[in-house]
Image (cartoon, rainbow, N blue to C red):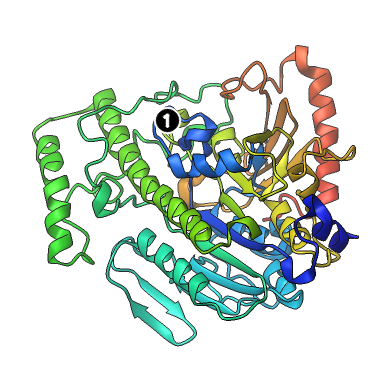
């Protein structure tokens, strides 16, 4: 049934050899509110916006565990963290398990992975891979492929894009392909490419309304976290107060020092403290974060141009997403991890020529858990037992199944880094509940009346009925996900 639907939709894919190619562009820590099409007030992303104008933008795409490696494992397997084995960034992904690239191979697709992998193991299920080791480096990065490890001179976002376009252009077979083009950017430490070292210089980026949040009516862990701009954003590492990175060659160092030397000299003589220092740190952080995104946006444009020039655009589905959201000074923070909106929410844009309505926007709750089954469905491959998501194909066709989810389940496991307490929770279109089991504390938010999640109403008698209903919902979501060892680590 899935094969039939994939081949007849829109009248485009009427023969097996005409099954669509899939290009999955995936970034690290790109918050949706730093994308023009999502309403960003701090930057412009003309090429990602171009993709959104030609396809469907998902307003409410969420992750099931807001941290890098676990999100990647969820996407590959279509299973929650407790089932795919990657609960935190310190775990090695078991490449022997079922993944959607393996199933696409079995369905006759040529598969490739280029860029950031971040799962410790050697990639499996790919006919070709060329990956960054670990987090990778922004400048003159090392890569690992089937022949070993080697170094490339240049800026990582540009290099990954070059490699992806080269791989597509050098393919010799007639079979459809699935390419995972995975960027390091805009992950910390935020190091812009040479082209954008001075972007935003001389202007102030608007501050979030809660840059100076005191977390007064949230769980106690919000007050003891170690991810605040004020206290934890490192000047020497994150904000580059000091020498240029060691990997730079002489030409790159000259560009770097010309950009950062004057900024560091100004800071050394500014004697900033208190709120003035927070504002300075925010500007340094957000500008470099956005400078990294500008190179990503260029990459998207280059890929779209290549597909058009090569005559592939009409037969290629292009997907843009990130592994989770990120705090852009929101709540006074950077990083991710929490079930709160800036880190729970992630961008998702899909261009399916001939099927997605140009400029369409979808408000249903969708998850990174859904990506695997969606890719398989789009390719006409079998939907295997064990995956826990749902194909987005009906939504992409402008249809909403009557049984589409109305809530989602979340579980964050990594205790230690940034001192964020472990917790699990559920979200509907209006309410969110979370249990911090290391603290034995609860939160409940009314997102309609309190979209910035400032005031937990868990103990508010006016919300007693809502609280009891959300407690029941959370238990149902937990059991449906098969998360039977909650609170045990």
Q: Residue sitting at 75 percent across and 56 percent down?
A: 12
Q: Quadrant of residue 447?
A: top right
Where is residue 316, by image quadrant?
bottom right
* Label 1, residues with CA under 10 Å away: few <14, some 14-19, many ≥20: many
Q: Is residue 62 above or below residue 79?
A: above
Q: Quadrant of residue 46?
A: top left
Task: Name the foreground residue: 208 vs 128.
Answer: 128
Work out whether 383 lies above or below 357: below
**For this view, does 390 lie left or right of residue 165?**
right
Question: Which residue is labeled 1 in the image?
Answer: 332
Along the horizontal axis of the image, is 71 left or right of 334? right
Instruction: Looking at the picture, tell me which residue is in the foreground, 53 or 454.
Output: 53
Reply above or below: 308 against 263: below
* Quadrant into which the N terminus falls: bottom right
| Residue farthest to the top, as pictured | 462
From the top left corner, tell me how far across and down residue 424 is, in percent.
69, 43
- Seen at 78% across and 37% down, the residue is 407
* 12 and 93: which is toward the camera: 12
Query: Which type of secondary structure does the marked residue at label 1 adopt?
Result: helix
Quick check: can you spot residue 346?
no
Task: Note whether residue 351 is visible.
Answer: yes
21 relative to 400, above or below: below
Q: Residue furthest bottom?
A: 147
Q: Where's residue 40, x and y in %?
A: 46, 30
Q: In percent of the image, x 35 and y 37: which residue is there?
A: 286
Quarter holding the C terminus is bottom right
x and y, in percent, of residue 108 in the image: 73, 76
């Amino acid at each position: 049934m899935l094969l039939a639907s994939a081949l007849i939709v829109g009248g485009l894919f009427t023969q097996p050899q005409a099954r669509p190619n899939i290009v999955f562009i995936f970034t690290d820590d790109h918050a949706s509110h730093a994308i023009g099409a999502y309403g960003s007030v701090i930057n412009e992303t003309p090429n990602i916006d171009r993709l959104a104008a030609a396809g469907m933008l998902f307003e409410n795409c969420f992750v099931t565990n807001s941290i890098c490696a676990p999100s990647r494992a969820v996407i590959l397997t279509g299973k929650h963290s407790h089932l795919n084995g990657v609960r935190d960034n310190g775990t090695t992904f078991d490449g022997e398990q079922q993944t959607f690239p393996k199933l696409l191979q079995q369905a006759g697709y040529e598969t490739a992975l280029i860029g950031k992998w971040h799962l410790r193991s050697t990639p499996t299920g790919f006919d070709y891979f060329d990956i960054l080791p670990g987090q990778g480096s922004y400048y003159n990065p090392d890569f690992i492929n089937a022949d070993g490890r080697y170094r490339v001179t240049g800026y990582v976002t540009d290099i990954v894009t070059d490699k992806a376009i080269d791989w597509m252009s050098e393919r010799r077979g007639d079979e459809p392909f699935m390419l995972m083009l995975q960027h390091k950017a805009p992950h910390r430490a935020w190091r812009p490419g040479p082209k954008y070292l001075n972007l935003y210089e001389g202007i102030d980026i608007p501050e979030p309304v809660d840059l100076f949040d005191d977390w007064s009516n949230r769980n106690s862990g919000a007050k003891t976290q170690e991810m605040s701009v004020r206290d934890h954003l490192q000047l020497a590492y994150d904000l580059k107060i000091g020498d240029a990175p060691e990997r730079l060659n002489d030409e790159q160092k000259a560009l770097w020092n010309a950009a950062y030397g004057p900024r560091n000299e100004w800071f050394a003589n500014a004697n900033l403290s208190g709120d003035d220092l927070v504002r300075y740190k925010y500007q340094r952080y957000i500008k470099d974060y956005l400078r990294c995104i500008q190179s990503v946006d260029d990459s998207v444009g280059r890929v779209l141009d290549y597909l058009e020039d090569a005559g592939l655009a009409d037969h290629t589905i292009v997907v843009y997403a990130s592994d989770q959201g990120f705090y852009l000074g929101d709540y006074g923070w950077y990083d991710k991890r929490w079930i709160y909106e800036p880190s729970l929410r992630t961008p998702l844009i899909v261009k399916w020529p001939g099927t997605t309505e140009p400029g369409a926007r979808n408000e249903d709750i969708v998850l990174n858990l859904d990506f695997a089954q969606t890719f398989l469905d789009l390719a006409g491959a079998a939907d295997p037992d064990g995956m826990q998501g749902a194909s987005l194909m009906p939504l992409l066709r402008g249809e909403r199944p009557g049984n589409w989810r109305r809530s989602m389940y979340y579980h964050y496991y990594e205790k230690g880094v940034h001192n964020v307490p472990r917790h699990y929770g559920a979200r509907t279109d209006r309410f969110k509940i979370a249990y911090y089991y290391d603290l034995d504390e609860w939160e409940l938010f009314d997102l309609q009346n309190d979209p910035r999640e400032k005031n937990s109403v868990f103990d508010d008698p006016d919300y007693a009925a809502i609280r009891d209903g959300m407690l029941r919902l959370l238990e149902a979501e937990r059991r449906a996900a098969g998360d039977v060892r909650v609170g045990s680590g």
